[in-house]
Amino acid sequence: MAEGQEGLSPYESLEEYMLTNCSVLMELVDTSKLDGYYRLYPSGFGFIAVNSRLTATDATCVAYHEAGHHHTMIDGNHAKTEARADRWAVKKLVPIQSLIKALVDGCRNGHEVAEYLQVSEKFLYKTLDIYQRVHGDYIGHGKWTLWFKPLMAHDYLADEVYPLE
């Protein structure tokens, strides 16, 4: 979903997906001190508000987190609800393959990877923390082994480690 349709940003792609497939409207609004929120109304229609004062990158990360609430809401346990929304957002916005691609395409540090993936550095580090909690220190993905801390990928067929020194 993060790559979206041709010409759409990740935010616009999510906005279109949520309205078309989930009956959830997303809008940039002044939410005061909140970065964003999700509401599901008794009619079944949902609403995601994202703070209009956020940068485009931060707005995208918040929007994916709020969409995660729509897709994972089960009970009223706030801590579990937030963690599920975070995991959903991470899987959709920063899949494992995109981390590998960022490294192979020359990103050498967290700032460059975040910029390449169009996410905030804070979201990138949250992503790496979540993946590490779920998978351990690394994950095998096809011909790749991806380590989360430090972030690096190993192509075991070509015996190449990224980022390249």
Image (spheres, helix red, strand yellow):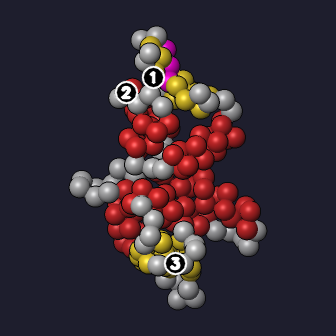
Which residue shows up at 40% across the image and 43% down it? Answer: 115
Inspect the image, locate mark 1, and give the three-letter code of the amino acid beneath it.
Pro
* Predominant SS of the magenta segment: strand
Q: Count the marks: how many? A: 3
Instruction: Kindly identify which numbered label has been placed on residue 163.
Output: 1
Residue at position x 55%, y 61% in the image: 65
- Asked whether disc 2 touches disc 1, contact meaning CB atoms under 8 Å apart, the reply is yes
- Which image quarter holds the N terminus? bottom left
Residue matched to label 3: 31
User: What residue is pinned by disc 2?
Assistant: 106
Indicate the amino acid at tag 2.
Gly
Q: Position of residue 92 (x, y in %)?
A: 48, 52
- Closer-to-camera residue (80/162): 162
Please give the range of residues in magenta: 153-157
Q: Position of residue 68 (x, y in %)?
A: 56, 62
**Residue 137 picture quarter:** top right
Compare marks 2 and 3 and give the one earlier in the sequence. 3
Query: Do labels 2 and 3 touch, CB within 8 Å?
Result: no
**Cα distance in 3D space between marks 3 and 1:** 39 Å
Callout 3, which amino acid? Thr
* Marked residue nearer the N-terminal end (3 or 1): 3
In-image side of 121 versus 52 (left or right):
right
Q: Earlier in the sequence, mark 2 or mark 1?
A: 2
In front: 89, or 57?
Answer: 57
Marks 3, 1: nearer the viewer: 3
Q: Residue at x 50, y 36 (%)?
A: 110
Disc 2 from disc 1: Cα separation: 6 Å
